[in-house]
């Protein structure tokens, strides 16, 4: 639960916690028969996600994951899987357009748009990739932020959310990737987007510390 507001009374009502939670589910999770599943590589984030939704179990294991843009390269890392058992999955699919049982979803996330910062933060941590780009041949260093997902529809939804943030966030068109589709935010815009994204996060507790730290450290290197 967040430090500021406490747990939501309804997991489908607009709330900072629900926006963050469903952003994480959309980015790296699924809705199946009687179960919502969300994955994270951050232990603290796993505890927070479980607390938000009252998850009945959280599993930890070492998994081999492909790199977002090249599935021929893999890495080993800890992964935490949070599962919420019950009818919430089917309700969320109907209310938010999340895929159910492997079917394509419409991603109708507008009910959560009042908390676009938390929603986008969940999406960044779920399917976003941050990298530091060292300048070559006189080019300036930069921070890259891209989104990779098997659903082009989700990426278009993320682009629509970026259109409405209070800082400039231009982005590329969606392109094919070995793991689905991807697009990137303009490098020059990433520092401002990243700072806006995590503004106030310390008070709310709605973030993955490892992901926030990587983004902030990358931004500091280009300032």
Image (cartoon, rainbow, N blue to C red):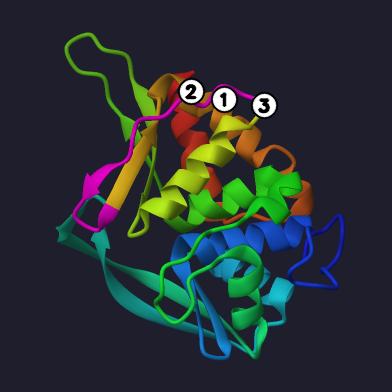
Local secondary structure at mark 3: loop
Q: In the drawing, does residue 25 fall left or right of residue 96?
A: left
Residue 125 forms part of the magenta stretch? no
- Magenta residue span: 167-180
Q: Position of residue 126 (x, y in %)?
A: 48, 58
- Label count reads 3
Residue drawn at (53%, 67%) of the image: 98
* Residue mark closest to the camera, 2 vs 3: 3
Q: Quadrant of residue 122?
A: bottom right
Q: Position of residue 88 (x, y in %)?
A: 66, 82
CB-based contact (under 8 Å), mark 1 and mark 2: yes
Residue 168 forms part of the magenta stretch? yes
Q: CA distance from mark 3 to mark 1?
A: 10 Å
Q: Is residue 9 above or below residue 190?
A: below
Camera sees residue 110: yes
Q: In the drawing, does residue 45 fall left or right of residue 29?
A: right
């Amino acid at each position: 639960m967040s430090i500021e507001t406490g747990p939501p009374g309804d997991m489908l009502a607009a709330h900072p916690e629900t926006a963050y939670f469903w952003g994480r589910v959309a980015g790296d999770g699924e809705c199946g028969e009687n179960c919502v599943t969300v994955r994270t590589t951050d232990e603290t984030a796993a505890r927070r996600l479980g607390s938000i939704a009252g998850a009945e179990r959280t599993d930890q294991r070492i998994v081999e994951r492909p790199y977002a843009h090249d599935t021929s390269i893999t890495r080993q890392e800890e992964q935490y899987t949070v599962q919420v058992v019950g009818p919430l999955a089917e309700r969320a699919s109907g209310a938010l357009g999340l895929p159910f049982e492997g079917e394509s979803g419409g991603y109708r996330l507008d009910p959560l748009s009042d908390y676009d910062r938390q929603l986008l933060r969940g999406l960044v941590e779920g399917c976003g990739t941050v990298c530091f780009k060292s300048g070559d041949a006189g080019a300036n260093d930069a921070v890259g932020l891209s989104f990779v997902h098997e659903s082009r529809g989700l990426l278009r939804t993320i682009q629509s959310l970026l259109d409405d943030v209070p800082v400039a966030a231009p982005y590329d068109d969606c392109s094919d990737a070995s793991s689905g589709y991807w697009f990137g935010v303009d490098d020059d815009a990433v520092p401002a987007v990243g700072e806006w994204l995590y503004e106030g996060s310390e008070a709310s507790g709605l973030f993955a510390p490892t992901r926030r730290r990587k983004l902030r450290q990358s931004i500091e290197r280009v300032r």
